[in-house]
Image (cartoon, coloured by chain):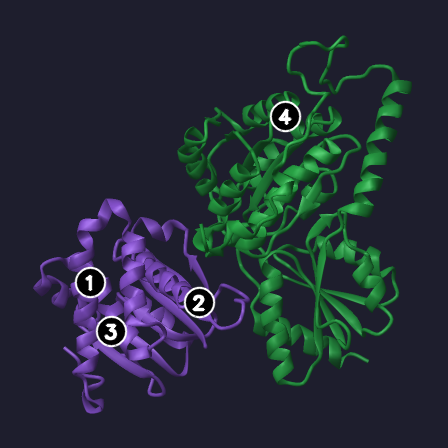
Amino acid sequence: MDEKIIFAGFGGQGIMSMGLIMSYAGMMDGKNVSWLPSYGPEMRGGTANCHVTISDEPVGSPIINEATVVVAMNRPSLEKYEKYIVPGGKLFINTSLIEKKAERKDIEIYEIAANDIANELGNLKIANMVILGALVRATNITKFESVLKALVEVLGPSKEHLVSINEKALKKGSELIENLNDKQKSHLE
Amino acid sequence: MAKVLMKGNEALAEAAIQAGCRHYFGYPITPQNEVTAYMAKRMPEVGGVFLQAESEVSAINMVYGAGGAGARVLITSSSPGISLMQEGISYIAGAEVPCVIANIMRGGPGLGGIQPSQSDYFQATKGGGHGDYKLIVLAPSTIQEMAELVQQAFHIADKYRNPVMILGDGMLGQMMEPVDFDILKKEENKIEEKPWATTGMGTRSKRNIINSLELDPQVLEKHNIEIFKKYQKAAKEEVRYEMTDCEEAEIILVAYGTIARVAKNAIELAKRENIKVGLIRPISLWPFPEEPFKKTRDHVKAYLTIEMSMGQMVEDVKLAVNGQKEVHFYGRVGGMVPEPMAILEEIKKIRGKK
């Protein structure tokens, strides 16, 4: 396994947390992992991203130039990172905020209205977990159980009360993929 | 404590605490702020001192004082902040006071930017401050190695009574990787007696003085010669490096820190095209490892040094190769990071030359 995942979106959408939870889960699975955040001015309102590598081998460069998976939570992220994906790779698009369609034909595209689903679940802040749940189920990069454990770890004791709502979002995202048959793959609402 | 996921900056701080460091002085600057934040929280828990000084100049002189009193002391900053400290660092080296300084480099010159860089290599290894002195400089390339080298740095600083510098870049400071503190050697954390330290007279009959001023040129010359005897010893005993795939390599890459990791990706790309490429990764930047070049310069076609600078370590590589083979350079600056594909292109260019 040598998975290279780029998470990207606005500062405040939980981009870093998605990457962190994924990294923890990979570590719990016994894999080599690295997590590299953007730490520039984008943290204060622009686009934020993080690069996560999960691999059987020791991780070389933590910077991802060719991604196996990209998560685009807003439009600038889709425009910037669609071209980073290797042929056959996977792209997750938050259609609640992105009207534009992906252009690539050689990748698997998952369109998920993450903000709308999060709102239905009662908390807009968990849109990131809806997508992460879908990502885990669609890619099998890590076990779903590992992600649930990693979530507890990342939230920590001070945010323990938020575990259940985040779990709900992860499960919802996972169900979306389970209910999906191949024909519907690019029209998920 | 099994494996934990930590930022390089946090691992640096925790390793220092585990090495018995109970004094930290600093002043915030990106991209090393997590060290300051971690120490602000952790030091009170272990009964240590955390102090955010009013400036870098002030902080380094606090280090001078604490180190002179025999404490294991850490100071961290990033490029412009380290420049401000150079006077103090020269005094500390002149007065033979041990301490550990970490520079988590960002792009320069001047205020530059906050993205990763390796353009302080000259400053770290060739002086920086005034006078004849050396820093022992260690460059980790993973978070685990960051923890290992920080612990070794305290041990080496005490052994030679000299400042030791950890030289990392913003990427290494900011990224997270699993780190296991349980597998670190514990014996280096034992702090030996420091009979020279200014801890009060007690039962001693002679005063201990920490000072870098000596107006008698004969005495000052002798002092310089004594200091350089230590550096000769360090040049023998503190050399550290890693060699990968060098035996049959046609071209050998030379890179340190995070760029050595990028180089490893380039080696994998080259393998796919049946090009045999190796890597020499200096871990101690001073003393610079010459041995791996002596071992390889007979069979290799050329060396390619890769840095996030306009070409600094490449000068030490040229000295080590001593004109016997070609030494090429590829660098990116200002916070840009060399890409594996671009390194492969450089390799191909060198191969194409007759």
Q: Chain of mark 1?
A: A
Local crowd size for mark 4, using a 10 Å CA cut-off: few (<14), some (14–19), many (≥20): many
Q: Secondary structure at mark 3?
A: helix
Indicate the secondary structure of the residue bearing disc 2: loop
Chain ID, green in image: B
Q: Which residue is drawn at the image coordinates 33% and 64% (left, top)?
A: A8
Q: CA distance from mark 3 to mark 2?
A: 22 Å
In this picture, residue B322 sits left or right of residue B185: right
Q: Of the numbered discs in the image, which one, if any, rests on residue A134?
A: 3
Q: Nearer the viewer, mark 2 or mark 4?
A: 2
Hey, which quadrant is residue A6 in on the image?
bottom left
Residue depicted at x 67% and y 73%: B346
Mark closer to the chain start, 1 or 2: 2
Q: Residue B264: x, y in percent?
A: 61, 69
The x and y percentages for residue B170 are 51, 50
Q: Are marks 3 and 2 on the same chain?
A: yes
Chain letter, purple in picture: A
Please name the residue that numbered disc 1 is placed on: A167
Q: Determine contact: label 4, label 3, CB under 8 Å.
A: no
| Mark 3 vs 2: CB contact within 8 A | no
Q: Is residue A95 visible?
A: no
Q: Residue furthest right?
A: B218
